[in-house]
Amino acid sequence: MGDRLTQLQDAVDQLAQQFVACLYYINRHHNLEVLGPGDQIRDVKQEPDQQEVDPHPDDVFKAAQVELAQDLITKEQQIELLITLLPGLENSEQDQERNIKELEEELKVAEAQRQEAIKEKEDTMAKLDAVIRAVGRP
């Protein structure tokens, strides 16, 4: 899994794709109805086997709309969660700078301990080498 920003970008891209899919479904499967007295249904000349709209029954269309809306809401909630997980939203700039300085100090201490351990290892190796050389071979 990628970092949080990549996950957030992927989720936003998926939400955009879901929006397009919803619009396509609604545009393709609605009933051709006039909504007002001045409305007209367009008469578009098409191929004989091609339909501009493939209406679904009202109950199927409404159920699909509900499912599409729930999918959009779920994806939006996932995006909200990813946003809340981004670092630094609850900290001010001064808090973040203080945390960075504290981490730098911890890193300096750890590096000093590492250097000390390396020196101790080298001293021990030198002593061990001296002991081995001091022991005569039979």
Image: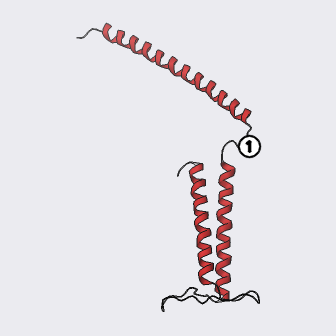
Residue denoted by label 1: 90
What's the residue at 60%, 68% (across, down)?
18
> In this rendering, would 104 be left or right of 90?
left
The residue positioned 67% from the left and 88% from the top of the image is: 58
130 lies above or below 73? above
Q: Quadrant of the C terminus?
A: top left
Q: How many marks?
A: 1
Residue lying at 42% horizontally and 15% vertically, measured from the top left = 122
Q: Is residue 20 above or below residue 130?
A: below
| Near-viewer residue (4 or 19) | 19
Residue 47 on image: x %, y %: 48, 89
Q: Given the current orientation, which residue lies at the most extreme bottom position? A: 48
Q: Is residue 13 above or below residue 136?
A: below
Q: Amino acid at mark 1?
A: Glu
Q: Residue furthest left?
A: 138
The image quadrant that residue 88 belongs to is top right
Residue at 60% across, 64% down: 16
> Regarding mark 1 in the picture, which secondary structure is present there?
loop
Q: Is residue 125 above or below residue 94?
A: above
Q: Residue 99 lies in what quarter of the image?
A: top right
Compared across the picture, whether 112 is left or right of 124 comes to: right
Question: Residue 138 or 95: which is nearer the viewer?
Answer: 95
Query: Percent x, y for residue 120?
Result: 48, 15
Q: On the rendered structure, is 65 left or right of 10?
A: right
Nearest the viewer among 130 and 2 is 2
Residue 22 percent coordinates (x, y): 62, 73
